[in-house]
Image (cartoon, rainbow, N blue to C red):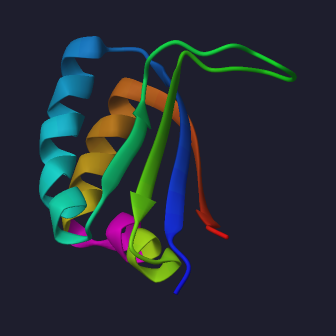
Amino acid sequence: MAKGYWIARVDVRDAERYKDYVAAAKPAFEKYGANFLARGGAFHRLEGDVRARNVVIEFPSMQAAIDCYNSPEYQIAAAIRQEAASAEMVVVEGA
């Protein structure tokens, strides 16, 4: 079964509130087997628009990645994130 990946590009507007999002999202990430491959850090733009923060999260499957996002646990965290940051997020299937 192919793994699933969240790819998120984020601009944080309120760093203190974003910490609340990180804490609130933790139970969902643990429940669905999330493995953070990239979480912020340095990056180099090759093409197109960029955001200040880039995150790649690996899940055991694409369905687990989708289920995590749609879970009640994550939706509580997502509401906090949407207050504190602007983001683009996709789920992609691994090879």
Q: Quadrant of residue 46?
A: top right
Q: Is residue 58 left or right of residue 7?
A: left
Q: Residue 77: x, y in percent?
A: 24, 48
Position of residue 41 in the picture relative to residue 47 (left or right): left
Name the image quarter holding residue 83: top left
Q: Mostly what secondary structure, the magenta segment?
A: helix
Depth check: give the residue in front, 40 or 94: 94
48 relative to 10 in the view: left or right: right
Question: Would you place residue 12 above or below residue 67 in this image?
Answer: above
Q: How many marks on residues?
A: 0
As for residue 93 lying within the magenta part, the answer is no
Q: Residue at x 46, y 82 (%)?
A: 63
Q: Is residue 47 above or below residue 91?
A: above
Residue lying at 46% horizontally and 73% vertically, measured from the top left: 66
Residue 29 to residue 31: above or below? above
Chain part drawn in magenta: 67-72
Up-down: is 62 above or below 38? Answer: below
Q: Position of residue 39 (x, y in %)?
A: 39, 31
* In magenta segment, residue 69: yes
| Residue at the extreme right | 47
What percent of the width, then of the height, locates residue 52? 55, 15
Q: Residue furthest bottom?
A: 1
Image quarter (top left, top right, bottom left or bottom right) of the C terminus: bottom right
Instruction: From the viewer's side, name the closer residue of 40 and 81.
Output: 40
Viewer-nearest residue: 16 or 62: 62
Residue 6: percent from left, percent from top: 51, 54
Residue found at x 44% / y 17%:
41
Residue at 41%, 14% (x, y): give it: 13
